[in-house]
Image (cartoon, rainbow, N blue to C red):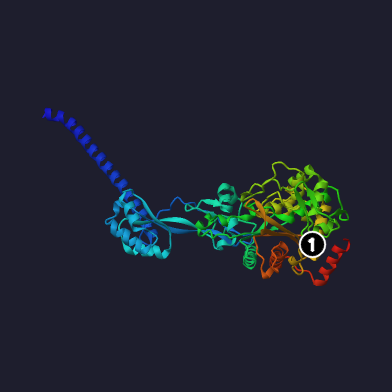
Amino acid sequence: MRDNDRADPAEARAARAYHARCRYRFRLACLGFAVAFVLIGGRLVTLGFAGAERGSGGLYDISTTVHRPDILDRHGRLLATDIRGATLYADPKRVIDRDELAEQVASVLPDVNARSLRERIKAGSRFVRIKRELTPKQQAEIYELGLPGLGFIQEYRRVYPVGATASHVVGLVDVDNRGLAGIEKFVDDNPQLTMASPQTASGEETVTLSLDVGVQHVLREELKAAMANYRAKAAAGVVIDLHSGEVLGLVSLPDFDPNHREQALDKDRLNRIGFGVYEMGSVFKVFSVAGVLDLGLASLNTSYDASSPIRYASFTISDFHGKGRPLTVPEVFIYSSNIGAAKMALQMGVDRHRAFLKRLGLLSPVTTELGPSAMPIVPQHWQKLNTMTIAFGHGLSVTPLQLAAATLPLVNGGIGVTPTFLPRSREDALATSPRVLKAETSAAMLKLMRMNVVKGTGKRAEAAGYRVGGKTGTAEKVVAGRYSKTALLTNFLAAFPTDDPQYLVLVMLDEPQRVAASNNHATAGVNAAPTVGKIVARVGPILGVPPKLEETERRFDAKVTASY
């Protein structure tokens, strides 16, 4: 009994240790089961949500395509937005019969090559993209095939509700929703832009432009009509608030529909306003006249002898419809005298003439949100002959946007405002823009431009009640190294209303033909000028510019022309 009594404590301790180990193992097992339950439950919940999202039967994931902000015009009208679309793919490891899959998919998607798809599936990667941007109908038809190994990825797709209407400004994106050109590219390069823009009611980011879709539509419609009426190969135009520099409309035809991005690859669809360089012709006389007035070398009463052509070396400078007599500054302008303009430039001198054009920005690109404009083609050795020919628009090639930007101070009181495609108040523009001309020079130029529409080469640009002022430009294009008498570039540069200037309009036509609509002529006065008149008559009400009554307009015109 004593021996058994002595063994009891040891056995008790062993028993207690054994029971403790059992409890520990039990708890560990319970913990393991609990963790497994949580993991399996979480996975089931995830799959449940995925199944709910799957909808049409394919496997959806959000791809790496970028979600972009909406682009709006100045009144909040939608120019570009994202929608979710499906991309069809195959997982070759799960495909049972690749021949059947390839044939069935090609029957639903005719642009998919069955043989090529079969070979790609045979290559054995885990992901074969078949087609992006499926329509809902195509997606449903693919789902109904019930073929193992097919799935869908949900991606963002960019759509442009107004199509080609604003394509050269808005730009376009690639298949991964990254900006390639226009404002789309600017947004990618400046992510802070969306942070400063208002959001939609749902919290979506937006970017608002200075464009007015109404103005844009009118501009495009009238340019298309001009191309058809005058059988021109191309046309372009721009409308700018001449105080704020806001671009309200910009069109270059032929254009492209950004919903079909492959159209943008056509070289004839470039943005001629910002990226084409041209000799612009007699419209450059606005700078010749402004130069001598601003430098104090002439007044509106000064005369220049235009009685005979200018001969310089082997070159002769003459007038299209010469008067054969001295001409005052207003007459040089309204009769578009090459001789008078050349003598004005000579009066300024080579250095001062070049410096004046540089001050207006005609010798360097204009930089906007669309990027720098094309580089102007400037004479390498600027000599006396260059000064004379540039005075009437030959020998210096610029973009139409440069021409428009350089004209703004001539009609807005002398302020060098830079064009912009983003909203900007007139007060902000004035505060950040330098004065480049005297106010008196600008006032004189407005009178001359109005006079040119009342009694000069721009008569057909008249829009009743809007007191349009402007200047024609007709340039012979260089063909096979020589100036052509038949291949012309015509343009009309206008401001309205000239008694209270608000907006600038520039229209350019490339190779208009001699047709009945232009009395079998092809110069700017009979094609570009009337096109501007039609545009002003339609956009004036949109922009809130009321037409003046006929009697009031007659009194204003009498006052403008009385002194000259």
- Give how far across and how far down residue 160 sits, in percent: 54, 60
Instruction: Give the left or right position of residue 519, taking residue 413 as reference.
Output: left
Instruction: Give the left or right position of residue 389, taking residue 249 as reference.
Output: right
Q: Which quadrant of the figure contains the C terminus?
A: bottom right
Q: Secondary structure at mark 1?
A: helix
Which residue is depicted at the point 86% across and 54% down? 305
**Depth check, front residue: 151 or 540:** 540
- Looking at the image, the residue that sits furthest to the bottom is 550
Count of numbered circles in the view: 1
Which residue is depicted at the point 50% across and 57% down? 262
Instruction: Give the left or right position of residue 470, taking residue 258 as reference.
Output: right
Q: Is residue 139 above or below residue 354?
A: below
Residue 201 visible? The answer is no
Instruction: Give the left or right position of residue 304, taking residue 107 as reference.
Output: right
**Depth check, front residue: 254 or 167:** 254
Q: Which quadrant of the figure contains the N terminus?
A: top left
Residue 107 visible? The answer is yes
- The image quarter in which residue 16 lies: top left
- Looking at the image, the residue that sits furthest to the front is 314
Which residue is depicted at the point 33% across and 49% down? 126
Q: Is residue 395 above or below residue 19?
A: below
- Give how far across and how far down residue 381 sits, in percent: 71, 41
**Depth check, front residue: 30 or 310:** 310
**Depth check, front residue: 496 or 21:** 496
- Give how far across and how far down residue 355 sits, in percent: 76, 44
- Name the residue that disc number 1 marks: 452
- The amino acid sitting under disc 1 is Asn
- Give how far across and how far down residue 546 sits, in percent: 75, 67
